[in-house]
Image (cartoon, helix red, strand yellow):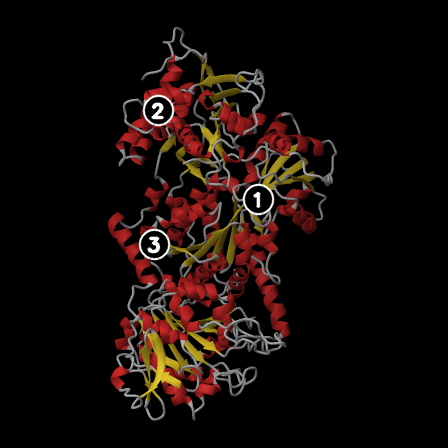
Amino acid sequence: MTETINGAGNGKGAAAELPVLTRKDFVSDQEVRWCPGCGDYSILAQTQKVMPDFGYPKENIVFISGIGCSGRLPYYMNTYGFHTIHGRAPAIATGLKAARPDLMVWVITGDGDALSIGGNHLIHSLRRNVDVRIVMFNNRIYGLTKGQASPTSELGKITKSSPYGTVDFPVSPLAIALAAEATFIARSVDTFTEHMQQTLNAAGHHRGAAFVEVLQNCNIFNDGAHREFTDREVREDRTLMLEHGKPMIFGKDRDKGLRLNGHLPEVVTIGQNGVTEADLLVHDETDALISFMLSHIYWPEFPVPVGVIRRIARPTHDQMLNDQLAQATAARGAGDLKKLLNAGETWTVE
Amino acid sequence: MTTEAPPRHEQPSEKQLERVTIRFAGDSGDGMQLTGTQFTRTAAAFGNDISTLPDFPAEIRAPAGSLPGVSGFQLSFSSTEIYTPGDAPDVLVAMNPAALKANLGELPAGGALIVNEDAFTAQNLQKVSYAANPLTDGSLKQWNVFAVPISTLNSRALEGLGLTNKQVDLTKNFFALGLMFWLYERDMAGTTKWIDDKFSKRPEIAEANKRALKAGYNFGETTEIFHERYIVPPAKLSPGHYRNITGNEATALGFVAASKLAGRDLFYGSYPITPASDILHQLAGYKNFGVKTFQAEDEIAAIGAAIGASYGGAMGMTASSGPGIALKSEALGLAIMVELPLVVVDVQRAGPSTGMPTKNEQADLLQVLYGRNSDSPVPVVAPATPAECFTLAVEAWRLALKYMTPVVYLSDAFLATGAEPWRIPDFEDLPSIAVANRTEREGFWPYLRDEATLARPWAVPGTPGLEHRIGGLEKADISGNVSYDPDNHHRMQLLRQAKIAGIANDIPPLDVFGPAEGDLLVLGWGSTYGAIRSAVERLQGKGASIAHAHMRYLNPFPANTGDVLKAYKRVLIPEVNLGQLSMLIRARYLIDAVGYNRVRGKPFRIAELEAEAERVLAGGGNLAQRVEVRMAAPRPAAAAVADPPATGDGG
């Protein structure tokens, strides 16, 4: 590989000499311009809060976004940032990460950006295990264009673009991520601030493609999008907080759980019909079948799983790409341009 | 060597020729591209000037023996400098009736026709609607026909090797090649070595091919059907060290050289598309040069990843052909807005939509100049010859890095697959194109421009203290913050335009071949160079007041372009499109240029341009091209004869 002048960053290696950073170090001088009451404020705050946890100097962190309300987030982060075009952020992040493995790269996207116009790039960045953290804000609506149905909008949803209701079935973002072979898949909620911090923290520490769906409220065009199971009074009974190696228990009284009946999940109550904690499914982030089940169950039939659904170790795209370069150089020596230009049959004219 | 040819009694006479054009034609599976390439290498290494035109169908293997399955390779080799693969072949080698039928129309009367008579079976004749065998019905009287039982002779030569009939049949192209080597007194050592290298793990196949090659050569030696052999002496090219190179090869090497010259890693994002894919294949092998290749999920991801790599400080680039360039347009606009260096290669092919993917055209000029939303200027460079692809690949990167801008590099199918001798440059003679990243914190603003070039600073992630945000939203001048200010937008549009327009002062002036003023200037761009140059040379030889200028820079135009154009009474602009450069020249310089526009998927012939130039010299103006609107489909048989299908490749 040739010597490059591609910037000086050396990633986490420099962490020991760094001053301790705080949330404030990651707040840019730009005025935040989301609608008052938007769930994006919380996501921004939690993102800024967890940034010091990773040990990267802030100049080695890059936020890349597409188009939509979520796309504005990089402007508010005092790191390097690139607000790109609709749906293409994962592609741009793939090239950046390939060129600069030393950087920590985050992709900020929305349900329209990631699953509609950019669906192809999402799938392929995940299947390649590009070492980026993709945070998808899911408000089940197009907000920036003022309220049209999105790929996650429920069937029959009435919007400006669908006055008679949509005739499109929604997709499950987590199921797409799983089908695309993502090595880290998680879900959190804009109002679950601590949970979101834990989830973003886990994504930040993962090596490889990390996909995080954040259920987010759009109080202007889709207010209460997730209210039925995220409101303070009901959330404990209607969401399932996942913990690796722990039984799947939920409920205000910690008395409900998930178990398998044959190959299908069912909700049971501990202490009823002889059910004990030992009967419940134990979460295993590496078990593909459990990941499949968790990415397909949803309210109202089931509690909505939140937390890390899948986490496995695989070599990353940039690592394998750069290993190939290193191996080729070791085997054939650093490229000699003169030799290359003079390769094959040559002749001299006097 | 076992053939039935009796020993020769008389030695053939030798005749010296200045230039010979051969066309090899056969079935897609007959290996005609390989045969042509081997003859080309041999002629080039011998010191002839060469120019080639591979012509193959998009179908990988059309039905054997059918017209759509015909693959051809034309090469011209000469003892003088040549610029085109020849208007028409002097010699046609036809391996079957389909190859004969598809190509015979272009062989001038008196031309030599070497055919594999074994392939002229009733079945093969019927496949291409020959009612009678043309080898025996007297219909080929106007040509010099050499009917050789190539298949039979070849399979006898390979007896005892234990190969299947199919394996034996696959080597018959080398028999034909050997015969041509004998006819033109060529050394077979280069091809023999190539066979040994290629089949080093399958010695029996290597042996078979070598035997076939020798058998063809010896057949020429012993048979008495050829009374003459031909010598084409080496050409007097400018002194230097040479190799034979195609446009796509030169393009790939140019980008690797640019990476070395700039001291930055090359990142090449691409989605497979004819005729650009070979650049990806070649660059994928240069990993020890720090070249990172990325076969993306689609055209948009390919350019997106390239932009990401450039954002990180690498040399991000992408390549495609017209349809893919259309898909990349929005991302190219982003690169213009964020002012990052990027090179986008468009290897043009014929037609709108999918068109004719393996055929030539130069009709993407307006697309790359204007095929984006808003005013979004990019520099456009276009090599004129396969060898020049190297130079302009380096030049594209020089401009991209110096001016912090995407640059479009316009090649085409003819340049990409055509070959010519290339004088290998010394690395020391190549320009330095390195630029530095911004690291100084003091006075840093993302859109504070360099006074001379108007380039903005390249501050890459990882640089402490320069954290900033860029994006596709309009930028405030200097600060780079998002801005909706009306005056700022107008100012930024003018600045982006001025930056690209200013490049006119940093590129070579448009030079002229021929008198500095006169009756007619023939102005071209891209791969029409050879045909225009040859036509102009011929007319100069006849005493016409005519000159040739060829544009390598389509945006901005060289600063002296207007002065050059105005020094001639008339300007003729031949293009393989319906008048794109003509429109630009007419609009910009208010000159009543005459266009010559033919889009047949093929390069121009010298003769047609010579005739057109003579017509304009005699006072002819723009001719309206009328098309007869037909109300019924022509009969299939007639169509096949009138419009011979493309010829294609073998393995």
Q: Which residue is mark 1?
A: B350
Q: Residues within 10 Å of mark 2 (few under 14, many from 20)?
A: many
Quadrant for the N terminus of chain B in the image: top left
Q: Which residue is mark 2?
A: B212
What percent of the width, then of the height, locates residue A275? 28, 86
**Badge number at residue B290:** 3
Pinpoint the chain carrying mark 1: B
> What residue is rendered at 31% in x and 49% in y?
A335
* Separation (CA) of disc 2 from disc 1: 37 Å
What percent of the width, then of the height, locates residue B180? 42, 22
Query: Mark 3 or mark 1, which is nearer the start of the sequence?
Result: 3
What percent of the width, then of the height, locates residue B55? 51, 36
- Mark 3 vs mark 2, foreground winner is 2
- Tell me, yes or no, whether the two marked residues, 1 and 3, touch with CB atoms within 8 Å: no
Pinpoint the chain carrying mark 3: B
Q: Amino acid at mark 3?
A: Gly
- Mark 1 vs mark 3, foreground winner is 1
Query: Mark 2 or mark 3, which is nearer the start of the sequence?
Result: 2
- Compared to residue A244, the image places residue B599 above or below, namely above
Q: Is residue B487 left or right of residue B227?
A: right
Q: Amino acid at mark 1?
A: Ala
Q: In the image, are marks 1 and 3 on the same chain?
A: yes
